[in-house]
Image: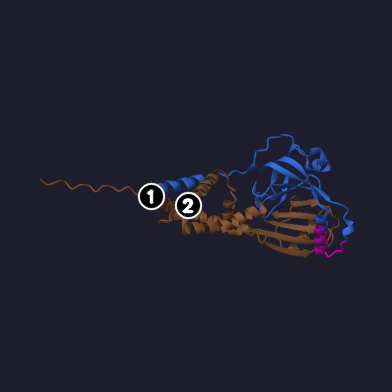
Amino acid sequence: MVNAPQKPLKKARPWRFYSILLHRYLGYFFLGITVVYALSGLAVNHVDQWNPNYMTEKQQVQLAPLKDKENLSSAEAKTLYQKLGIKQAFNPQNVFYPDPHSIEILLSENDKITLSTETWKAEREQIRRRPVLHLFNALHLNEPKKAWTLYADSYAIGLLVLALTGLLMKKGKKGIWGEAGIWTVAGMILPVALILLYYR
Amino acid sequence: MKSFAASLTLFAVLGLSFPVGAETLFGKAPSLKNVIKISALLEHPEHYLGKEIRVEGIATDVCPMRGCWMKIQSDRKKQSLILKVNDGEMVFPMSARGKHIVVQGKLVKKVMPLKDVIEIERERAKKENKPFNPASIKGPRISYVFQPSGVVVH
């Protein structure tokens, strides 16, 4: 009589196997959004030095004083447009008088002329969105709200899980208490020091 | 695992495909019906301080850096009202320039210290190549900004 071949017993996998698995797939899934947040983070961090969303072009011309400070006539606007090389027709409805020192003409949402009624210098400011980066920043700052909030929240939780599963990845006797622990503490020194120094 | 990834992809695509309307709301939808004219507000600001009110007007400028302020043209010439929010609370888009804005919120009084006023005026005079005498500044500068709880861009 021949015994039927026995199926090998399934070994229970160690918890570290599932931890690494989770780390790996969360890493894949959140790769794209990590790129978005990282690039936008770099851009937004330096907001004092540059505009992360828009590129600005400025053009200045000198104008003769207006006959009436409170009314930009069509003829005067035409002269101004010619000096700035604007071919668009003048629309008096786009003229604003925001304060006693200036007149503003909105040519479009991205194109504006500010005329100083003190120096009679006119400055045209044209802005253009930075391609791609503008969208990354919008996502980073949660401008879309709604479903994006949910997704960004899941990313935040995902990052926590990634950090924890990363921490538990180290094998060996010491585990997280050895080299991994030193790196972890090293990374915490600066933020903790800043909190203690500046936000007590 | 593949089908799980496919489901998540579908979820992400559906989640991002919310319809975008012609109006854009920031914060809570304005509920007050009575509209206060910006000129009236700026003429008697103390009367409106701390009260929840509604104003309307054309946006002539938006903070290009963080979208944290917006300038609304008054119904009277040489006047405008600044809407100011804490960074990130609402992010006003540049596309709001030239659009009709409906706002509900409170007027807040700001006092700029004398030394800051002197610094600003010194810079301004420098820019305009004009002489500047710090003694010409008599005291701190008082201004009023509008802190919105809700903004609709039409």
Q: Is residue B71 visible?
A: yes
In percent of width and height, residue A194 lies at 63, 55
| Image colour assigned to chain A | brown
Residue B154 in magenta stretch: no
Q: Main secondary structure of the magenta part?
A: helix
Q: Residues within 10 Å of mark 1 (few under 14, many from 20)?
A: few
Q: Residue at x 55, y 55 (%)?
A: A37
- Identify the chain of the residue marked 2, using the numbered disc in the image: A
Q: Is residue B116 above or below residue B154?
A: below
Question: Circle 1 sits in a helix, a strand or a loop, which is it?
Answer: helix
The residue carrying mark 1 is B2
Q: Residue at x 47, y 52 (%)?
A: A162
Q: Amino acid type of disc 1?
A: Lys
In percent of width and height, residue A77 lies at 78, 58
The residue carrying mark 2 is A162
Measure how far apart labels 1 and 2 are at the Cα level. Answer: 20 Å
Q: Looking at the rendered structure, which numbered label has been put on residue B99?
A: none
Q: Residue at x 47, y 59 (%)?
A: A179
Which span of residues is magenta-colored? B119-132
- Whether discs 1 and 2 lie on one chain: the answer is no
Disc nearest the viewer among 1 and 2: 2
Q: Residue furthest left?
A: A1
State the residue in front, A23 or A155: A23
Side of A194 relative to B119 (left or right): left
- Labelled pair 1, 2 in contact (Cβ < 8 Å): no
Q: Is residue A40 visible?
A: no
Q: Amino acid type of disc 2?
A: Leu
Q: Which chain is blue?
A: B
Where, quadrant-wise, is the N terminus of chain A in this rendering?
Answer: top left
Residue B120 in magenta stretch: yes
